Amino acid sequence: MIDSINENLIRPEELAKLLNVSKTSVYRIVESRAIPFFKIKGSLRFEKSDIADYLKSNRVESIN
């Protein structure tokens, strides 16, 4: 069970790489509470499904 939970969590560095933004940008997103996160002994972790939801909610549709 722990392995499956761990597979669904990513670190801020991984999220920055995934979104193609800086780590600072990830911390700004966290500070604004725009994406849910876990804080484990001071370390941040993000659930992959929350990242997908965040991306969907920030999608801008084309005009065409």
Image: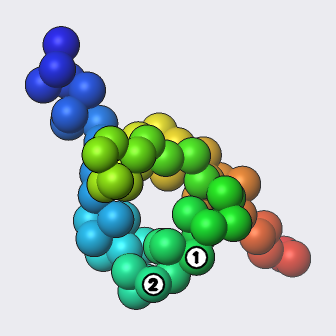
Q: Is residue 22 left or right of residue 41?
A: right
Q: Quadrant of residue 61?
A: bottom right
Query: Dividing the image into 4 quarters, which one contains the N terminus?
Result: top left
- Furthest toward the left, the residue is 3
- On residue 40, which mark appears? none
Q: Which residue is mark 2?
A: 24
Front-most of 43 and 11? Answer: 43
- Report which residue position mark 1 lands on: 28
User: Does residue 49 appear left or right of residue 55 in this picture?
Assistant: left
Question: x, y (%) of residue 4?
Answer: 20, 23
Image point (60%, 53%), residue name = 35
Tell me the element at label 1: helix
Task: Tell whether label 1 touches label 2 (CB within 8 Å).
Answer: yes
Q: Is residue 48 visible?
A: no
Alpha carbon of mark 2 to alpha carbon of mark 1: how far? 6 Å
Q: Residue at x 27, y 65 (%)?
A: 14
Extreme-front residue of the structure: 41
What colour scheme governs how the chains and residues are painted in the rendered image of this protein? rainbow
Q: Is residue 21 above or below residue 1?
A: below
The three-letter amino acid code for the residue at tag 2 is: Thr
Q: In the rendered view, does 32 fall on the left or right side of 52?
A: right
For residue 47, what is the image quadrant? top left
Q: Position of residue 46 (x, y in %)?
A: 40, 48
Residue at image x 41%, y 46%? 39
Residue 28 to residue 11: above or below: below
Which percent across, then down, holds residue 25? 51, 81
Task: Work out which quarter of the rendered image holds the C terminus and state it.
Answer: bottom right
- Near mark 2 (Cα within 10 A), the count class, few <14, some 14-19 or many ≥20, is few
Inspect the image, locate mark 1, and give the three-letter code of the amino acid beneath it. Answer: Arg
Residue 41's x, y, as percent? Answer: 29, 46
